[in-house]
Amino acid sequence: MSQQGLPTELGTEKVSKLLMKYAVPAIIAMTASSLYNIIDSIFIGHGVGPLAISGLALTFPLMNLAAAFGSLIGAGAATLTSVRLGQKDYASANIILGNVVTMNTILGISFTIIGLIFLDPILLFFGASSHTLPYAHDFMTIILLGNVVTHMFLGLNALLRSSGYPQRSMYATIGTVLINICLNPLFIFVLHFGIKGSALATVISQFIMLCWQIRIFSNKKNFIHFQKGTFKLRKKLVIDTLSIGMSPFLMNLASCLIVILVNQGLKKFGGDLAIGAFGIVNRIIFIFVMIVFGFNQGMQPIAGYNFGAKLYPRVTNVLKITIICATVVTTCGFLLGEFIPHLVASIFTTDDELISQAVNGMRIVMITFPIIGFQMVTANFFQSIGMAKKSIFLSLTRQMIFLIPGLLIWPHFFGLDGIWISMPVGDVAATITSGIMLFIQFRKFRKGNIVSDI
């Protein structure tokens, strides 16, 4: 790893230029990740049918749960790797790499076994019916069988980013998307594998790029590479990894719970197609949320470095610019969801009823979309300056404090629309809370009362 790109530029370079430099690769990777999910829905919608989209939507909670366990290892190991490399402790960094492989293998196999044994009861609990269960079962069976590949791919990709190869990490993500685009139509339209073909395309694309990652980490010229003896689990390393990864794990777990409640409510008040409509709306929202996440990833090192260096005007500046960029992104989502929702929904299906329900849901959910960029950036800002507790609180308030009560209350007054309404209401409440906390924090900054968790 070269000495190029040392963090001194974080305190001297123009903030807007820095943000673009750090954010653009992350945005490209995030956008590719969201496209990865959308591709499945489009090919399934046109090649299998509207109920297959509903079946796919039912798998979201289980896939989110798998991602939660993946982030438990990946996020924690990535942070530890960055610290060890900063300390020039390359031996420990190599041990982390070996332990990530072992932990992902154990966790991946365990999740697969438990998931396959209880798959049908889980999907029925998530809101499956006799019409949608076969689609969800077929898709999730293949995804679970390839779960070790998925865990390993995500874990090694996180280590690529943290060990000084963000572009290679981005290439790995983009590679899975491109391979998926090629394999999906082949398996669905040519070989007629149905929804199983889409799942197979997902696993194969990740496996191919995983082989590329393994090749990179097998190169002994790299500071971090596979070494004999590093795969044996170290107790302290495992504990540290899981402790650091607990925050993203809990947030992914909360997302999983929300999707379960949404699906159950949609099934009760709207039926199978309502779940499919949520699947479409969720995919569209995901694009814009991922782009904002990309800006957040770009903001993190800039805000953190300048906060540590007590260059507070630069901290404020990067926060303002990131909020503006995020708001522009989410406003574009608002315009798309409010003015051309029919065109957007038609990309996924030709079924008139499914399109109608997706259009209605999109217009309701995205009515407050311009303000959520502010909420997302604010939560990430607190994390960037070492105030993790406040960041976790803000991240969970929308889902656990505001959204869940709404999902339980509003449908009794507005029926199916009540499910949709609970989401923008939760956004407004969470944004107001974020604004208040940010205002209070900046008052403390001005008084010199600055306390970080680290």
Image: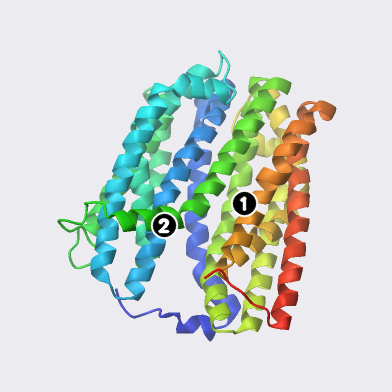
The answer to whether the residue labelled 1 contacts the one labelled 2, judged by CB atoms less than 8 Å apart, is: no
- Mark 2 sits on what residue? 76
Q: Please tell me which residue is depicted at 58% across the width and 16% down the height of the picture.
A: 129
| Residue 225 coordinates in the image, percent (x, y) | 22, 61
Mark 1 / mark 2, whichever is N-terminal: 2
Q: Is residue 296 left or right of residue 138?
A: right
Helix, strand or loop at mark 1: helix
Q: Amino acid at mark 1?
A: Phe
Mark 1 residue crowding within 10 angstroms, few (<14) / some (14–19) / many (20+):
many
Q: Amino acid at mark 2?
A: Gly
Q: Please tell me which residue is depicted at 54% across the width and 42% down the height of the picture.
A: 253
| Residue 7 coordinates in the image, percent (x, y) | 45, 80
Which image quarter is the N terminus in? Answer: bottom left
Q: CA distance from mark 1 to mark 2?
A: 26 Å
Of circles 1 and 2, the one toward us is 2
Question: Would residue 451 be visible to someone looking at this image?
Answer: yes
- Farthest residue toward the front? 235
What numbered label is drawn on residue 437?
A: none
| Residue 268 coordinates in the image, percent (x, y) | 70, 21
| Residue 410 coordinates in the image, percent (x, y) | 80, 33
- Farthest residue toward the left? 228
- Mark 1 sits on what residue? 288
